[in-house]
Image (cartoon, grey):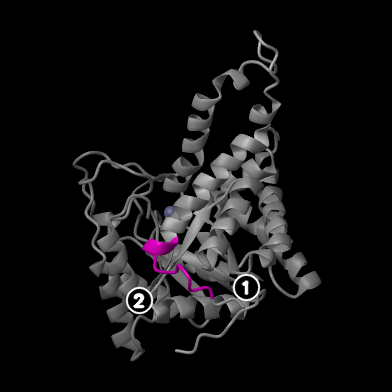
Amino acid sequence: MATNTLKPGVVTGKAYFELVDACKSGGYALPAVNITSSSTANAALEAAAKANSDIIIQMSNGGAAFWGGPSLADSHNARVKGGVAACQHIHMMAEHYGVAVVLHTDHANRKFLPWIDDLLNFGEDYYKLHGHPLFSSHMLDLSEEDLKDNIETSARYLERMAKIDMSIEIELGITGGEEDGVGHDLAEGANTDHLYTQPEDVLAAYDLLTPIGHFSVAASFGNVHGVYKPGNVALRPEILKHSQALVQSTHSLANNPLHLVFHGGSGSEKAKIAEALSYGVFKMNIDTDTQFAYSEPVGNYVDAHSIAFKHQIDPKDGTPYKKFYDPRKWVRACEVGFADRLVEAFKDLESYGKSIAK
Ligand SMILES: [Zn+2]
């Protein structure tokens, strides 16, 4: 497959679709990292530049609300405008990092469809002005509903989004665990059949969505949000293979016709990740591990400079501690930890050194 080169910066529409194809034909995936602030956004961009890999940056509704301002009484407004503000920051800065950057939203269940509606209102206005959308793709997660309701609602959204060159990510089957209040708790010994996507469901989604526009599918193969004690649910990447095979044989298509997404990537075994890549996974979400990687350094920093977090000036000898408590010092330590962990993710997903932006 030809690998076209893309312009560095945020990629949407055709450029995004080409990037997805480049990942799949190259046998690698991009980390989709959750950001909540300009600090985590910049650290994500820094990591991508360092690894010379393209990257997917995404926001949950809670992440967007945090960016918008957690004290705001109207949290819907904070979620919408926070998401728009984050995009504007990244559209402005991304090109300077020399890689292609995809902007995505994370899980929106039925309750959060009004969030997507208003992001699309802003997205359509932005499209009129700039000729490209704010976000490359939105994710709807209606996996707890009937298949019919799930894919028909997704189709309605894709109709609107395709007009402004956007893609959609849908979820079929349920990702275990919980992400920002969306998801599913895993009781010990619970029946876990619903955690495995049925290939027939994927085919139904493919048939409905393909004539409308570009889409990707988060299929469940025992993946779980967060990091848990292993052993509760088994990862079975062959589920992905079966879905690809059914769509491929039904429509006489080339290998791996579906664009697949791996949720709950934190803490996964490397061999299972590699297997998932071979079945057309181009995006793997990472949040829990990068949250810890951002927080761990501040713990170390405070341990090393604890006095500077209690006194501006040393109570005994008058030494000023500004250079230690300046928030840029310890926030920067967090950013470096976050970026280092992401560089590891680029290596696990085999996207390290493979940016197609020039
Ligand atoms: Zn997820």
Which of the labelled discs sits on residue 12, or is there none? 1
What residue span does the magenta drawing correspond to? 346-355
Which badge, 2 or 1, is on the more N-terminal residue? 1
The answer to which image quadrant residue 124 occupies is: bottom right
Q: Are marks 2 and 1 in contact (CB under 8 Å)?
A: no
Magenta-colored stretch includes residue 352: yes
- The residue at which mark 2 appears reads as 203
Taking the image as shown, residue 302 lies to the left or right of residue 203, namely right
Give the residue drawn at x 68%, y 30%.
323
Task: Point out residue 78 in the picture as x, y percentages from the top left corner.
Answer: 68, 43
View quadrant of ligand 1: bottom left
Q: Main secondary structure of the magenta part?
A: loop
Task: Tell me the quarter of the image containing the N terminus.
Answer: bottom left
Q: Secondary structure at mark 1?
A: loop
- As shown in the figure, which amino acid type bears the numbered disc 2? Leu
Q: Nearer the viewer, mark 2 or mark 1?
A: 1
Say if residue 20 shows up in the picture. yes
